[in-house]
Image (cartoon, grey):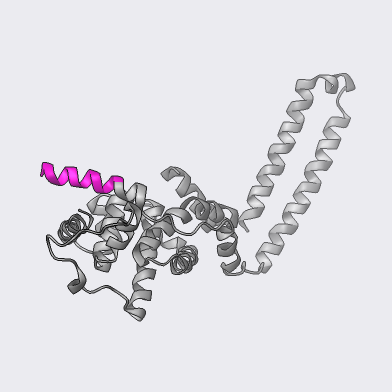
Amino acid sequence: MKHDKNTDSQLRELFKADLADGPRDPDFTRKVMNRLPDRKPAGWTRKLMTAVYIIAVIIAVTLFVHVTKGINPDTLKDPMTLLTYFGMLATYFTTMALSRSRT
Amino acid sequence: MTRLEEISLVARCVGFDDRRAFARLVDEYHQPLLRFLTGMCGDEILAADLAQETFIKAWKGLKSWVGSGRFSTWLFAIGLNEFRSHARSSRTEVSADEIPEAGAEPLKGIDARMDLNAALKYLSETQRAVVLLFYYRDLPIKKIAAITNMPENTVKSHLQRARAVLKQILN
């Protein structure tokens, strides 16, 4: 058993060090990706969801403008407040984008 | 790549048809797969073709990878099947009669790298697959049994015989 373990570790080292590397092709991934089946065409449900997302974006932007319009301009000068508003908007758009990529 | 990363990337591929996620998996595993397939068939060009076919098949069958094992294990199983399909049609194995007898002159004048890659040709396809998965990929017997679709005892038996042949040739 000990002899086998020694043989095993020697063979393992030999395989790791001396096994042929295989061809190096920097374009391998690109070649594989080009051979993948085409994306499925968008069905009517996908087109409907796209329309819904566009309308949701328009509503979000309109709301943002409306909300910030009524705010005291001095409040908006506060960087943290401004950052918070932009952060909320960025989160909303990111969520929309991620949901969009599902369909 | 961790198992969690694999699961996350495959989920993106299956759920969102995210090709960039699949490209990440190809980037991660194509070189080890190429090395394995080159060891199996001894031909770099063939190995590259087989590796491409393996990834195409993996993409098409991603939904069947349930995430219970590593993605790489599943990928290598597909790669081995691709090799076997090709070998069935070409039948270029070295026969067992060509294995040097015990005590025969060892290979001389050839560096260690040539020794190993030449020695692999003296193993049967199954023995080659088992030693590559065991010594190169460091996989346990259980996973090798799953990849090669053989009982564990059969894998151990092939490993023992292959080890004996390699010792005989490389010594």
For residue A35, what is the image quadrant?
bottom right
Q: Position of residue B107 (x, y in %)?
A: 25, 59
Q: Nearer the viewer, residue B88 or B151?
A: B88
Nearest the viewer among B3 and A69 is B3
Question: Looking at the image, which residue sits at the far left?
Answer: A1
In the image, residue B4 above or below residue B128: above
The part of the image, by quadrant, that contains residue B158 is bottom left
The image shows residue A3, relative to residue B110, as above or below, that is above
Relative image position of residue A78 (x, y in whole percent): 81, 19
Q: Is the magenta region chiefly helix, strand or loop? A: helix
* B45 sits to left or right of B138: right
Q: Residue at x 18, y 73 (%)?
A: B97
- Whether the magenta-drawn stretch holds residue A12 is answered as yes
Residue B62 percent location from the top left of the image: 46, 61
Left or right, A48 with respect to B153, comes to right
Q: In the image, what residue occupies the spot 14% across and 47% down?
A: A4
- Left or right: B52 with respect to B162? right
Where, quadrant-wise, is the N terminus of chain B in this rendering? Answer: top left
State how many labels appear. Answer: 0
Bounds of the magenta segment: A1-13
Tell me residue A18's x, y (percent): 35, 51
Q: Residue at x 37, y 65 (%)?
A: B42
Q: Which residue is at the front of the view, A73 or B7?
A: B7
In front of the other: A3 or B113: B113
Residue sitting farthest toward the front: B109
Reply above or below: B98 against A95. below
